């Protein structure tokens, strides 16, 4: 099998000051996703269904009220695969490099996305997430932090999701996105089959500081070439 198309090197620190992102945080704290969310959802859903033959499973596991969706992360398309099959409006954390002066930045912020200032201790991101959860919203937070470079699922969750869950009391719903690490192969004419599986929710009462930062509930080591992932 040919190697996957190369992924761009990550930039692990955003040099811009925190004030650069104040307006983006203020918007998501005061407003839910606007009409552009549904426009993008419809467009990307058609793309996911037709080009990547995407399928969704278990979306009924996403409850009403404050909830944290915690997918694995291997592609820029993961936002869209997750949102395509969950009817709730998910407000994702996203790396700060996605926010700037271009039209995509407008789409992100009016669609409910908010920035994480990479390479810094960013409390503004958590303030925004808590505000969304306080009004009963859905926050999307990639449990591994950045994208997997190989398609292999990380061995442990980042502690930020533990902080968000324990301090907010919100339910956490693990999400396994399979096949998306090969989406970038479209440049070679490739069209991988992708799926988005939503696991049983983990209520706040089930969490402890130890469990939150472990990967015991996460899919096993790799989803590459697999039709499904199993829980430990």
Image (spheres, helix red, strand yellow):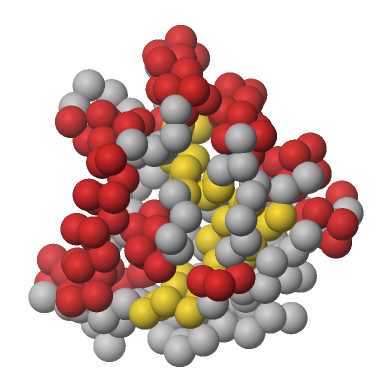
Q: As drawn, is 110 to the left or to the right of 44? A: right
Of residues 174 and 214, the one drawn nearer to the viewer in this rendering: 174
> Eyeballing the image, is 117 above or below 138?
above
Q: Position of residue 225 (x, y in %)?
A: 41, 86
Residue 228 is situated, as x and y percent measured from the top left of the image, at 51, 86
* Figure disc tally: 0
Which quadrant of the structure image shows residue 169? top right
Whole-percent x, y for residue 192 in the image: 27, 79
Q: Nearer the viewer, residue 115 or 61?
A: 61
Left or right? Give the position of 137 relative to 17: right
Q: Nearer the viewer, residue 35 or 16?
A: 35
Residue at 68% across, 57% down: 172
Q: Which residue shows up at 55% across the image and 48% down it?
A: 138
Q: Is residue 31 visible?
A: yes
Residue at image position (74%, 81%) is 232
Q: Is residue 64 left or right of residue 17?
A: right
Q: Is residue 31 above or below residue 40?
A: above
Q: Quadrant of the N terminus?
A: bottom left
Identified at 12% across, 72% down, the residue is: 188
Left or right, residue 186 beside residue 223 = left
Q: Is residue 63 above or below residue 26?
A: below
Q: Position of residue 33 (x, y in %)?
A: 39, 38
Residue 58 lies, with reference to residue 31, above or below; the image says: below
Kindly tell me whether residue 153 is visible in this rendering.
no
Nearest to the observer: residue 143 or residue 57: 57
């Amino acid at each position: 099998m040919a190697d996957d198309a190369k992924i761009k090197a990550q930039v692990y620190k955003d040099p811009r000051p925190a004030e650069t992102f104040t307006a983006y945080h203020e918007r998501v704290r005061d407003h839910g996703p606007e009409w552009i969310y549904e426009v993008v959802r419809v467009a990307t859903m058609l793309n996911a269904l037709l080009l990547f033959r995407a399928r969704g499973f278990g979306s009924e596991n996403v409850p009403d009220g404050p909830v944290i969706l915690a997918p694995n992360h291997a592609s820029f398309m993961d936002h869209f695969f997750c949102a395509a099959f969950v009817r709730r409006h998910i407000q994702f954390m996203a790396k700060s490099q996605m926010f700037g002066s271009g039209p995509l930045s407008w789409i992100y912020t009016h669609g409910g996305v908010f920035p994480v200032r990479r390479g810094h201790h960013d409390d503004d991101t958590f303030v925004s997430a808590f505000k969304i959860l306080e009004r009963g919203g859905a926050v999307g937070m990639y449990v591994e932090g950045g994208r997997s470079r190989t398609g292999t699922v990380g061995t442990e969750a980042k502690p930020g999701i533990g902080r968000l869950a324990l301090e907010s009391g919100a339910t956490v719903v693990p999400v396994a996105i399979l096949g998306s690490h090969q989406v970038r192969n479209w440049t070679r004419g490739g069209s991988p089959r992708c799926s988005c599986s939503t696991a049983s929710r983990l209520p706040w009462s089930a969490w402890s500081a130890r469990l939150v930062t472990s990967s015991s509930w996460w899919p096993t080591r790799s989803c590459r070439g697999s039709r499904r992932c199993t829980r430990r």
